[in-house]
Amino acid sequence: MQMPKPSDADKERFRSVLPDHPDVIVKPMFGNLGAFVNGNMFAGLFGPTIGVRLSECDKAELEANHLTQPFGPEERPMGGYTGLPAAWNDDAEKAEPWVAKAFDNVASFPPKAPKSRPPKK
């Protein structure tokens, strides 16, 4: 499985479309980036593609009206996430509202409990 590496410009573009909210946490994930709220990922970067986790209603609207793409590895895209259209890579005004909708959707989920680590021997 080939993992595409985002450019510095891709990473900056990703950060620029995230909501300005104190609960947003950006973490590296497999050489890419993920944006989290309450421990749950609401948006991610996979190479140049931004993926969002929308409500079913918002996902259906986005996919029906825009040329979306799978998010994640081609042979195994991430379920529940939709890749924003590649044409939006240079248009933050089109991407930002969908990333905000993903934030609102995932912020409504219960906080993810931290994984317990086995005791050190």
Image (cartoon, helix red, strand yellow):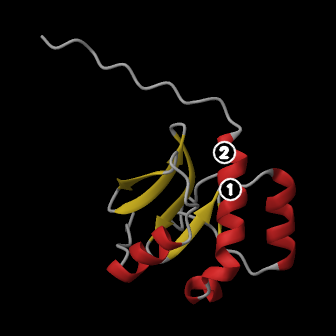
In the rendered view, tell whether residue 115 sits above or below residue 105: above
Q: Secondary structure at mark 2?
A: helix
Depth check: give the residue in front, 11 or 6.
11
Q: Is residue 85 left or right of residue 50?
A: right
Give the x, y percent position of residue 115: 41, 24
* Disc assigned to residue 53: none
Inspect the image, locate mark 1, and give the three-letter code of the amino acid beneath it: Ala
Residue highlighted by disc 2 = 106
Q: Is residue 7 left or right of residue 64?
A: left
Which of the 4 image quadrants contains residue 19? bottom right
Q: Is the residue under label 1 in contact with that under label 2 (CB below 8 Å)?
A: yes
User: What is the distance, in whole Å, between disc 2 and disc 1 at their CAs?
Assistant: 6 Å
Q: Quadrant of the C terminus?
A: top left
Element type where label 1 sits in the image: helix
The residue drawn where x is 65% and y is 42% is: 107
**Front in this rendered view, residue 115 or 75:** 115
Nearest the viewer among 78 and 23 is 23
Mark 2 crowdedness (10 Å alpha carbons): few <14, some 14-19, many ≥20? many
Q: Which mark is residue 102?
A: 1
Residue 23: x %, y % from top left: 52, 45
What is the x, y in percent for residue 4? Answer: 38, 72
Residue type at tag 2: Val
Residue 2, x across and y down, in percent: 37, 68
Residue 91 visible from this viewpoint: yes
